[in-house]
Image (spheres, rainbow, N blue to C red):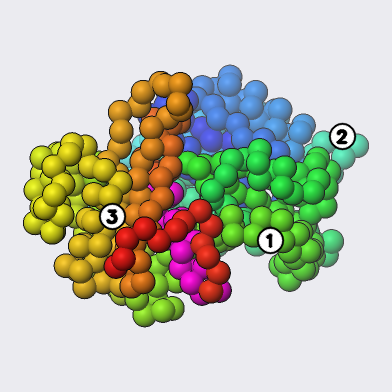
Amino acid sequence: MMQAEIIAFGDELTSGQRLDTNSQWLSQQLAECGIRVLFHTTAGDDLVAGCDVFRHAIQRADVIVSTGGLGPTADDLTRECIAAACGVDLTRDESVLEHIRALFACRGRAMPERNVVQAMFPRGSRPIPNPHGTAPGIDIQVSRSGRNPARIFALPGVPAEMHDMWMATVRNALAGLSGDNRCMIRHRAIHCYGTGESAIEAMLPDLIRRGRVPAVGITASQATITLRITAEGPSPEACCAAMQPTADTIYQCLGDYIFGEDGDTLQDVVIRLLVQRGQTLATVECDSGGTLAQWLSAGDPDRRVHRGGWVLRDPVSIASVLKNAGGASETQSPLTETGLQTLAANCRTIFRTDYALALGPFPPQIESASGPPPVYIAAAGPAAVYGHSTPYAGHPDILLPRTVKEALNFLRLRLQAEESNEPAVRSSPILPP
Ligand code: ATP
Ligand code: MG
């Protein structure tokens, strides 16, 4: 299998001012072509560093794709670096120069002398056409003693230009390179919520070991645990078939910890379940600043499910909303578990929805012997109001998203349990509707 290295050039990348999204995009594209990316290299705009990076890449990768540094200014050094690393000189391509001149003429400007450099190419290379910008890319084959030659594709840094050139030219060139023994790579991501990474791993047979075919990886992002299956094969269909038995095992072992695949989020799944049932949802949030409503409304652009909700914060205001909502006896501060359930039930009535999902308020994060304090969650439905709580602990960066996910997951499990007429895990009716 061919191996690739992606090189991103730019001081704005190494100084941390801009995130290198080109390499991420190119990695996904190369994988689709069946080429494994082994290295991402990032270098500043520096001649010596750039030459070094290309020399190393030529030794360790069969395909090298670089972005950036093809412009006309003094800090754009990619063409010099490639020429030096390949041991060739730069020559002027008259037809490219004409093309650049014509582009300037179209815009009613004379070509600045500096732009001549963009028509300079390492000897033996071919320009990669750039329909929307001035700088063509560079495509060059480099011979290596005793091995197949390496191939370099240098593309501009501007993401939109780079994408167009990849799609129009580079992708096809690579398909030709890999020829008949073409190998594709496909991924399948299975998302879980409700327990930790190591607990998930412990529920599975030995799937995550090195060298397994197809490979299974596990990652955690804001309390969502993802199992990623990767398969190689001659066609997308062959890859899917190779992944299916592994996916079946994962589903058997993890049951309803699994909420979706690939692009699915918990809110997508909740919305989908409610759409299927023709039902609607309103939300009550204390302290989550509207995150729950924002996720749901972004996932429901046609307004089929999420009717709106209350975003509450100040305890006095919460008490007053609760009073208006009919929970007259509630005077405690902060809001109690019962208070939240009353809010959920009344929100459901006022918004005339089938369900109302409520969460919060967030307790102060205090260390205590009895463990972290709980955050309450309530789901008011046609049959009853269901209560749940989750410990308010963990890294501050994930507390908010995890609490919101906990609420969505609670509703998901309820809806799924109703579908299958089974009692939902970890929930019980508390109040009449
Ligand atoms: P140009 O012909 O436009 O001068 P160039 O090849 O010289 O192209 P750069 O000047 O390095 O490209 O970058 C142009 C723009 O693209 C800048 O806004 C830069 O921040 C952005 N860019 C460059 N490299 C990347 C990258 N790896 N990821 C995301 N954006 C990038
Ligand atoms: Mg640059």
Q: Which residue carries the number 1 mark?
A: 251
Q: Nearer the viewer, mark 3 or mark 2?
A: 3
**Residue 226: percent from the left, percent from the top?**
60, 49
Q: Return the disc, 2 or 1, that comes first in the chain's sequence.
A: 2
Q: Nearer the viewer, residue 195 or 27?
A: 195
Residue at the (66%, 55%) spot, across then down: 254
Q: Return the disc, 3 or 2, that comes first in the chain's sequence.
A: 2
Rounded to the nearest angstrom, the CA distance separating label 1 from label 3 is 33 Å
Classify mark 2: helix, strand or loop.
loop
Q: Which residue carries the number 3 mark?
A: 341
Bounds of the magenta segment = 404-420
Q: Is residue 331 above or below residue 431?
A: above
**Residue 236: percent from the left, percent from the top?**
71, 67
Seen as rendered, the residue at the extreme right is 146
Q: Nearer the viewer, residue 275 or 263?
A: 275
| Image quarter of residue 258 | bottom right
Residue type at mark 3: give it: Gln
Q: Is residue 77 above or below residue 106?
A: above
Residue at the (65%, 41%) spot, across then down: 199
Q: Which residue carries the number 2 mark?
A: 145
Q: Nearer the viewer, residue 373 or 189?
A: 373
Name the dominant secondary structure of the magenta segment: helix
